[in-house]
Structures are given as C-alpha cells and as structure tokens.
C-alpha cells in the first residue's frame, strides 16, 4: 500500500497514548490500533476529523503517500527508454 499512517509518530510528539486518544475521540482502542498499524483499508472523514481535532493536527500530519517500488521501477525504465530515443 502506498499510503502510510503516521499516527504513532504524532501520538509520540503529543506525548499521548492510544488509550487516551481513544477516550478523547470515542473510537475503540481496537479500531485505532488497526489504523495505527497500517492494517486499515480506509478511514471515514468524520473519524479523521475527530482524530485531527484531538491531536491538533492536519490530515497530512497523519497520512503519507509513497510511490510503490513497482511504479518507481517502471518510471526508471520509461526514463531510460526516453534517453535512448532522444
């Protein structure tokens, strides 16, 4: 998956536990744990909003996009072909 959840980093920066966030947001500890470990398949905007409010952060502080290795290799191969042609 190319989207990574950085909830653990933000919690650490805020000196907050997952249990404390669960109590503030009203989301079960189990569901927050799934999100924190990157096993979640999606997140509702209302949940993201509640987490951002509790942590005083932006969605971009919690989520990070990284290209997958396959895309990067394909981009490199395409660039190499373009170099050969041009």
Image: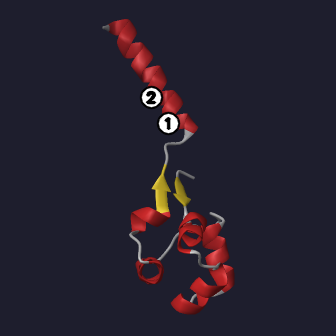
Q: Secondary structure at mark 1?
A: helix
How is the protein colored in the picture? secondary structure
Residue 61, x across and y down, in percent: 44, 64
Q: CA distance from mark 1 to mark 2?
A: 6 Å
For residue 62, say whether it is visible.
yes
Taking 51 as reference, is 59 above or below it?
A: above
- Horizontal placement of 64 versus 36: left or right? left
Residue 23, x across and y down, in percent: 59, 92
For residue 40, say whether it is visible.
no
Q: Quadrant of residue 12?
A: bottom right
Residue 79, x across and y down, in percent: 40, 20
Q: Which residue is mark 2?
A: 75
Residue at image location 37% in from the left, 11% down from the top:
83
- Horizontal placement of 30 versus 9: left or right? right
Q: Which mark is residue 71?
A: 1
Taking 20 as reference, is 81 above or below it?
A: above
């Amino acid at each position: 998956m190319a989207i990574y959840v950085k909830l653990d980093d933000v919690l650490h920066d805020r000196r907050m536990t997952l249990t404390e966030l669960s109590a503030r947001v009203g989301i079960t500890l189990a569901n927050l744990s799934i999100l924190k470990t990157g096993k979640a398949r999606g997140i509702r905007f209302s949940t993201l909003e509640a987490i951002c409010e509790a942590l005083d952060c932006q969605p971009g502080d919690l989520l990070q996009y990284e290209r997958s290795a396959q895309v990067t290799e394909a981009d490199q191969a395409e660039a190499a072909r373009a170099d050969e042609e041009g």
